[in-house]
């Protein structure tokens, strides 16, 4: 199983970061224009849909845990040739938020059991353009 972690520290309160992580109008701004559909209830479906170069890409899964504004966990299936939408082919995303003196540290963990996923991999802060977009958006909301 591949486990990858990315961390970003944001100069914004945890509640602001939580809102940007969970509200579709904000998710679209930091996640490659993805349209998010879910009600964030445990057990509910979750779907991210993105248009790119005339094609529609969809990832779908299930909300696994919600502890606002501390942790969010969901599973996703990203279609690939030869891979069926079964639990063993879904990866899990975990967003963990900790606050210190008005700043929020967000740890993104992806647990990926899919064939060919590889081993553990961590990203340094500032290396991930999605996290940079998240940070910029959150900080612009409190500026």
Image (cartoon, grey):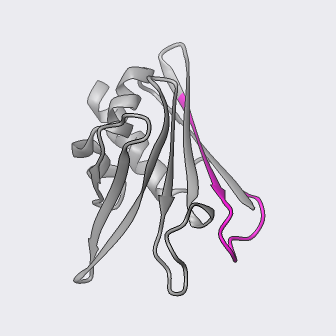
Q: Is 111 situated left or right of 93 in this image?
A: right
Image quadrant containing the C terminus: top left
Given residues 68 and 10, the one toward you in this image is 68
Residue placed furthest toward the bottom: 81
Which residue is situated farthest in the top direction here?
Answer: 101
The residue under the point 44% across, 23% down is: 68
Classify 52 as above or below 63. below
Is residue 124 visible from the viewing direction of this image? no
Classify residue 122 by image quadrant: bottom right
Image position of 120 (left or right of 107): right
The span shown in magenta is 105-122
Q: How many marks?
A: 0
For the point 21% across and 44% down, the residue is 25
| 19 relative position to 92: left or right | left
Whole-percent x, y for residue 49 in the image: 29, 63
Q: Residue at x 25, y 45 (%)?
A: 24
> In the picture shown, does residue 97 fall above or below 3?
above
Question: Residue 91's x, y, as percent?
Answer: 58, 58
Depicted 21 relative to depicted 50: above or below? above
Q: Quadrant of the N terminus?
A: bottom right
Residue 29 seen: yes
**Looking at this view, is 55 or 31 the one in front?**
55
Quadrant location of residue 19?
Answer: top left
Q: Is residue 121 magenta?
A: yes
At x 35%, y 34%, the residue is 138
User: Residue 86 or 136: which is nearer the viewer?
Assistant: 86
Identify whether 124 is placed above or below 104. below
Given residues 51 and 133, the one toward you in this image is 51
Q: Is 140 part of what is drawn in magenta?
A: no
x and y, in percent, of residue 57 in the image: 33, 73
Q: Residue furthest right?
A: 119
Q: Which quadrant of the view contains residue 60?
A: bottom left
């Amino acid at each position: 199983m591949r486990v990858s972690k990315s961390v970003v520290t944001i100069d914004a309160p945890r509640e602001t970061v939580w809102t940007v992580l969970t509200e579709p109008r904000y998710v679209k701004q930091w996640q490659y224009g993805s349209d998010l559909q879910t009600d964030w209830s445990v057990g509910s479906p979750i779907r991210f849909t993105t248009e790119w170069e005339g094609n529609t890409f969809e990832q779908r899964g299930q909300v696994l845990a919600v502890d606002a504004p501390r942790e969010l966990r969901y599973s996703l299936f990203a279609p690939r040739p030869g891979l069926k939408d079964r639990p063993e082919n879904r990866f899990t995303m975990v967003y963990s938020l900790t606050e210190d003196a008005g700043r929020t540290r967000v740890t993104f963990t992806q647990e990926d059991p899919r064939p060919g996923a590889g081993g553990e991999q961590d990203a340094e802060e500032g290396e991930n353009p999605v996290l940079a977009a998240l940070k910029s958006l959150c900080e612009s909301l409190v500026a």
